[in-house]
Image (cartoon, helix red, strand yellow):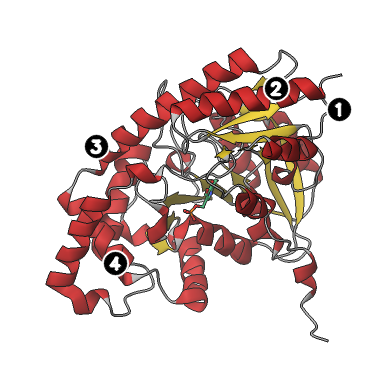
Amino acid sequence: MVKYAERMNLLTGSEIRELLKLTAQPEIISFAGGLPAPELFPVEGMKAAAIKVMDEMGRTAMQYSTTEGVPALREKIAERMKAKNNIDTDAEHILITSGSQQGLDFAARVFLDKDDVVLMESPSYLGAINAFKACEPKFIEIPTDGNGMIMEELEKVLATTDRVKMIYVIPDFQNPSGRTWTMERRNAFMEIINKYEIPVIEDNPYGELRFENENMPSLKSMDTKGLVVFLGTFSKILAPGYRLGWTCASTEILEKFNFMKQSSDLQASTISQLETNAFLDMYSLDDHVELIKEVYGKRRKCMLDAMAEYFPAECTWTIPDGGLFTWVVLPKYIDAKEMALQCIAKNVAYVPGGSFFPNGGNDNTFRMNYSCMPEEKIVEGIKRIGEVIKANLK
Ligand SMILES: Cc1ncc(COP(=O)(O)O)c(C=O)c1O
């Protein structure tokens, strides 16, 4: 019989992926995935960029390139981080990765030994939990409220816990909760981090997709000690299929990530990088992001309005200022996993919230994605979920 490494016992297939398989039928109204809307992908623009790259530098595009990434694209990313996130950086401090998901994998491998402690918001991104699990850490969840991570709780844990090696956070339009940290929390967080000097992974795939209120400064822009590792991605502002993300970190930390990149897959796809770089030369990504924001903003409003109309008063949900998700809390006695099956029977789907908590529990929660369905389907889907919730009330 084949014997596997012990860590494989910790890794189970993502529940979301299993569920997505179920929800792939066209008749299902799915709020389950976290996918960007495919109808907004700039297919024609990317096609023109691809032709230009193949005409002008086909052989370069098909060749290996450097581990760090294509210099022109790293320059553009650094410029964008300055403009959008107020981060004072340059191309030297950018490593291009295969999606930001790869940055999460590297973060775990760079910072975590078996039984080290990683802190994260409760709830947090399932893909990060799974990536970190491969390094067999212990997870401590820090409670959150409508303003983000609760800093008194973070300080308490840091003051009383050995072997905390990394803190993972998503301060802007969090996946799964849709919440954004207030300025006060950001300031308090940086003060605590500077005191304990623990590396922070700031994962920011949604920050540019703000529909309401003012942009918040990234933690990385407030970092004076080189402790914050910022993960960015083109997945939600352009298209995920190119698998292009980036890590921005201090020289010392980025060097470690670079070693990981070399041993993992040598480099991100040269073709993806050159085509994306050409697209950025030929078109305005800002205009494209505005279009995405307009469509998602309308879908968000549509979902929130429908929830207010069709969900019973016994449940609550978050009002996101941007991003792709809202988060629903049911009465404690309702199991959102069981209820998901009842919903699928009515051809509507969401993701049960339990899997976003590394230590389990919280089965009365679920995540809703609004980016991927047209408005009439959103209303119909919410109506159906509302009926199922009402049928489960005691
Ligand atoms: C919080 C968060 N981090 C990282 C990722 C991974 O994105 P990608 O690898 O496509 O950049 C996602 C994808 O949904 C996400 O929600």
Mark 3 vs mark 1: in front: 1
Mark drawn on residue 70: 4
Image: 367 above or below 275: above
Counting residues from the N terminus, which is met first, the one under dot 3 or under dot 4? 4
Give the x, y percent position of residue 111: 63, 62
Q: CA distance from mark 2 to mark 3?
A: 39 Å
Q: Is residue 287 left or right of residue 133?
A: left
The amino acid sitting under disc 1 is Tyr
Which three-letter amino acid code belongs to the residue tagged 4? Val
Q: Does residue 215 appear in the picture of this structure?
A: no
The quadrant in which the C terminus is found is top right
Q: Where is residue 121 drawn, in percent x and y?
A: 67, 39
Residue shown at 59% from the left, 41% from the top: 32
From mark 4 to mark 2, how far is it between C-alphas? Answer: 52 Å
Badge 2 marks a residue whose secondary structure is helix
Q: Is mark 4 within 8 Å of ligand 1?
A: no
| Label located before the other in sequence (3 or 1) | 3
Residue receiving disc 2: 387
Q: Are marks 2 and 3 in contact (CB under 8 Å)?
A: no
- Of tags 1 and 2, the one toward the viewer is 2
- Pointer 1 residue: 333
Rendering coords of residue 77 (x, y %): 31, 52
Which residue does the image show at 60% across and 19% down from the upper left?
307
